[in-house]
Image (tube, rainbow, N blue to C red):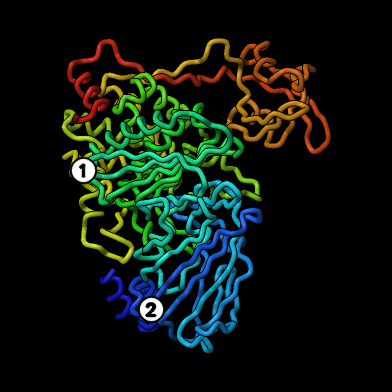
Amino acid sequence: MAETTRLASEDNPAFCRAGVLVVLLLAAAGTLRGAEELSASPLQLEYHLILTHPNLHLVTVEISAGKISGDFLDFVMPAWSPGRYAIYDFAKNVQEFEAAGAQGQPLAWTNPDKQTWRVDLRQAAGSVKARYRVFGNDLNGSFSQFDGTHANLNGPSIFMYVAGHKPDPLTLTVDAPKGWQLISGFSDDTSERTFHAPNYDRLVDTPLEACAENKLAHFQEQGKTIRVAIHSYGDDHTDPSTLREGLEKIVHAEMASMPIPDFERYTFIFHFAPQISAGDGMEHLNSTQIIIRGDLGSNLADALETAAHEFFHVWNVKRLRPAGLGPFDYTREVYTPSLWLAEGVTTYVSYLTLLRSGLWTREQFFARLADEIRALEEEPGKTLMSAESSSFHAWFYDRTPQMQETNFANSTVSYYNKGTLLGMLLDLEIHARTQGAKSLLDVLSSLYHKFYQAPQATYYGPGRGYEEHDVLEAVNEVAGSDFSSFFESYVRGTASLPYSSDLGAAGLALRISVPSGAPPSIGITAIPDNLGVRIFAVRPGGAADRAGLGRDDLLVAVDDQSLATEDLDTRLKAYPPGASVPFTVERQGRQEIISVTLDPPVANSYTIQELPGATPQQIAIRDRWLRGKN
């Protein structure tokens, strides 16, 4: 870079002047970012949360700022919530904003953009109080809900920040209905109502649950207090001790495998809600929210599986984090190519945890990994999108509402899914290259020491973020071997994953077969319709694609046999592969007959099996992989 700049300055003075201008602009941008982080003149910030209108689902927030200066102050509502890579524009639920000065005098304000309220300070007399209300009625890891039974509040959807002052310490006071308990990563006791946060990021990284009834439990692990709060709807009288006992096993296994985390207490906040459309889980620095669709009695396994994933985020992403994920720019997308590691590898480790803690059998562990392989291998997008690209483009599809139709079904892969498999294969290959002496957990521990336990680089917290190349360097160092081709082919590239060689090193084999009685395939993903089935996606190169069928085509009948009274698979079982079968297709309000030449049944039964002739070395690697060091 320096050499290029020198040559440009000698050969083209105009280019040199433009280059200097670019450098100055970049320097200015850096200065602005630095001002956001350093906050040379901290404000005296007090947040007041008022929970008095559950029937309207309206939360009232007051933000008092003392020691102010200048002509205006910007109050900004986040556009997204860390942990979910989607722009939600939380400002859309803000109403009744107002501001007053030190003597209660109203202050004028404007909206310079959709998420900023700019308050005129010229009449403020030294301090300002902003007041607004937020509508919240979604039980979700990113949104908030306030109703007659509880308030579940996720900070970015509730709290504005003062521009340029996210690093400033603050106090939060909560007014909740009489008799309600408060649970959060801030509190020691459910009666606490005042909390202190070192900065805005910590405030919004600490969700709060307030309700009249919580089932509470706690246990100790390596000198740390682990608290469990259960909020249920309906008449769920399930004994919560089964959940606590499972959590004890998970926490013990994960804390034994990684460096001791720097918290004194950690809080699990569970919600069991039969009426919601989907469950959720969201990681936070010293707590997690886990939302399960259904009751505890029927969904204990799901709750524990989610908990194993979310608790491992204590290390992977909340402390050991990709560059850019803390401190955050809450106004726009923040990109990283490393979500395959932050989320996918976390999922893989959670599977290991469930096995090693005794909550899963070896057969369950193998079955889940085989299902992950099947899910990836059935994705047409696996040849088009890499793990890094899936991570980088998460903002397109991470629970993001889609008004415009997309071709994601044929062009994308999940960084959770592919990251899980990359974690498995990396772990197996590290075990194989080191004869079982090292593992992927050693890599994560090494990264944790190098980056999280490094000198603090920003106000956000200890350490600094890693770049993608740092991950490869850590793998190479731990394994004492070069993994460059692995990363180039499978992390940055879209080559077929090396299941056979890596599983084989542990005396295992992936078996893929056609289920007994499987029908011929036409290569579609379909959605049931009252009149038949509607095509959602067409597999490129498959039977439907060759015949000219497309998305949104409605398949009404197979050879005049209705698809409204019998499912598609049953109808297709009457024909051999290679048969040319007439389909009645409704397209744009008109019906036509399209002949489709059927493909062989899809081999979609995946299993991981132990090889009967495995060598002692393969068995040793397998056992070390499955059991861990302890």
Say whether residue 44 is visible.
yes
Question: Residue 259: image x %, image y %?
Answer: 22, 44
Residue drawn 19% across and 38% down? Answer: 479
Say which quarter of the image contains residue 215.
top left
Q: Relative to residue 248, is residue 129 drawn left or right?
A: right
Of helix, strand and loop, which one carries label 2?
helix
The label number, if any, that marks residue 147 in the structure image = none
Return the residue at label 1.
476
Q: Quadrant of the N terminus?
A: bottom left
Q: Relative to residue 595, is residue 462 drawn left or right?
A: left
Q: Amino acid at mark 1?
A: Asn
Return the residue at label 2.
28
Q: Which sits in the foreground, 231 or 581?
A: 231
Asked if residue 293 is positioned above or below residue 176 in the image, the reply reads above
Q: Relative to residue 590, is residue 393 drawn left or right?
A: left
Asked if residue 304 is positioned above or below residue 488 in the image, the reply reads above
Asked if residue 459 is positioned above or below residue 152 in the image, the reply reads below
Q: Which sits in the foreground, 576 or 336?
A: 336
Disc 2 versus disc 1: distance between alpha carbons?
A: 38 Å
Say which quarter of the image contains residue 29.
bottom left
Q: Quadrant of the C terminus?
A: top left
Question: Residue 24: image x %, image y %?
Answer: 36, 80
Q: Amino acid at mark 2?
A: Ala
Q: Which sits in the foreground, 208 or 593?
A: 208
**Nearer to us: label 2 or label 1:** 2
Asked if residue 359 is positioned above or below residue 312 in the image, the reply reads above
**Counting other residues with Cα less than 10 Å from the Cα at mark 2, is it few (<14), some (14-19), or many (20 or more)?**
few
Q: How many marks?
A: 2
